[in-house]
Every structure is written in C-alpha cells, then in structure tokens.
Amino acid sequence: MDKAFKVFLRFSEWNGFTVGLKDLEIPSEVREAMKKRIAEVEKEIDDAIGAYERGEVEAEAGKTAEEEIEDMIMGKLTKLRDEIGDMAARNMDHNSHSYIMALTGARGSVLNLTQISAIVGQQASRGGRIVRGYSDRTLPVFDHGDMSARGRGFVESSFYEGLDPVEFFFHAVTGREGLVDTAVRTSQSGYMQRRLIHALEDLHVEYDGSVRGAEGELIQVRYGDDGVDPAKSDHGVGVNLDKIIDDVMQEVK
C-alpha cells in the first residue's frame, strides 16, 4: 500500500488537479435565461406585496398577514435559487475539476458552485429575510417600508460577476451573524456537554447490554431501550440494510 501511494503521489505531481474561472463559466444565453427568470419572480413578489398592502392577503391560523407574506416571499426566493442552481449545474462543464470536487463530496457542494457562477440568493437572518437596520428599512438607499426582494437581502448577482455595494453589505450581515452564532453556540454546547458528562460519569454499559451505576445498581435493562449505539448507528438502526442495498444497486446500474 505504501508503494502504491507513492505511485499515486508521483502521478499527482505530473497531473495537477487545479481549478480556475473557466470551470464555472456558463453560456451567455443560459445566463440571459436566468436573468429573465429572476425578473419574473421579482415581478410576482411585487404583485404579492401590492396585494398585502391592499389587505388582500389571508393569513393562516396563528400568523399575522405580514408573517404570511414574508414566508411566501422567502419560499419563492428559495425556490428561485434552486431553479437557477439546476440551470447552472446542467450547463456547467461536468468534466471540470470544480464540478468533480463538488459532485464527489471532496470539497464544497453544487450550491457553492451555484453561488459562484449563477446567483448568491436570498440572505437569511434569524430564520427570515433581513428586516433590521434603519427605521422601517434595511438601508438608507431604500424607501421607508420597502418590502421588495432587493430591499430585504436578495442578492441576484453571482460571485463570478461581482456583488454591488448593497448586495455586498447584505452578504456581510449574514456572514457576521454566522460567525457570532458559531462563537456563542460553541461555548454553550461545550458547557452543556461538560455538565452531561459529569452527571453520567458513574454510568457504564455491562456486557449483558444493561446500564449500571458505580456500585452495580441497575439503571436500564437495555441501553437506550434498543441497545443501539448512536455513535455507530445509521438513522437509529445498527445496520441499515435498505440503504446498503440501494447503494449497491446504484453502483450496478
């Protein structure tokens, strides 16, 4: 194995696996079709906002009209990003190194490629569109009460084309939120784990599958009631035969 790996390393030295901008180029006619579809969805959103302002939006039970329209807009923009992503993926060079990396799971994902080459999409803050900022608007460049897609964090450009200042700002907002959220969550989950470990440090699983305390007292007849180790399980079962069979059938096809 050691010799085989050395051969592989030498092959890698002679045959570089590199990525470049050409990997992510999309034909101009496809890019035009994307722009057209984005304009159509933005028009649908503007019509929906007009209906909301006229009081024609009926909210589901437990929701206000504003929450209903926000959820609807968020759904439309999420669906739009997926549509544009599919268009981009179909028209990319499937032999390009960037696409191969995303497809195999080596690094990145097709969504990352979509954001680079086609559309960054709606920026989400606290589970919804960006609504905080200045009085009754996200930025001073927008009118008061502006609920449009662009006015609340929709980025229709791609990283390949470049973001304008407003889009860049919205992208930075969600980036900062992600950093803060990660830092706070790490400390909270670390403290919770420490408390749990301290509370459970006297428990152990015996060879008969039961859970017992430090003095051998019975805590649980069978570990977790099913005897499955979550660290070694697949969706709650020790061996997921259905998934294994599906994987094998896919390889056979």
Image (spheres, rainbow, N blue to C red):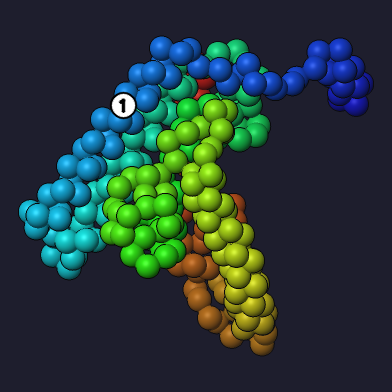
Q: Point out residue 88 in the picture as x, y percentages from the top left corner.
A: 45, 22
Compared with residue 40, is residue 66 higher up or lower down, i.e. above or below? below
Q: Is residue 38 visible?
A: yes
In percent of the image, x 44 and y 41: which residue is there?
A: 155
The answer to whether 212 appears left or right of 68 in the picture is: right
In percent of the image, x 49 and y 46: which residue is there?
A: 166
Q: Point out residue 221 in the picture as x, y percentages from the top left corner.
A: 49, 73
Disc 1 residue type?
Arg
Compared with residue 120, is residue 249 higher up or lower down, i.e. above or below? above
Compared with residue 96, is residue 58 higher up or lower down, i.e. above or below? below
On the image, numbered disc 1 is attached to which residue?
37
In percent of the image, x 13 and y 59: which residue is there?
A: 59
Q: Is residue 208 visible?
A: no
The answer to whether 82 appears left or right of 66 in the picture is: right
Q: Point out residue 154 in the picture as x, y percentages from the top left corner.
A: 40, 44
Compared with residue 251, is residue 58 higher up or lower down, i.e. above or below? below
Q: Nearer the viewer, residue 241 or 235?
A: 235
Quadrant location of the N terminus? top right
The answer to whether 21 appears left or right of 246 in the picture is: right
In percent of the image, x 55 and y 82: which residue is there?
A: 218
Q: Point out residue 117 in the picture as x, y percentages from the top left corner.
A: 53, 26
> What secondary structure is marked by label 1?
helix
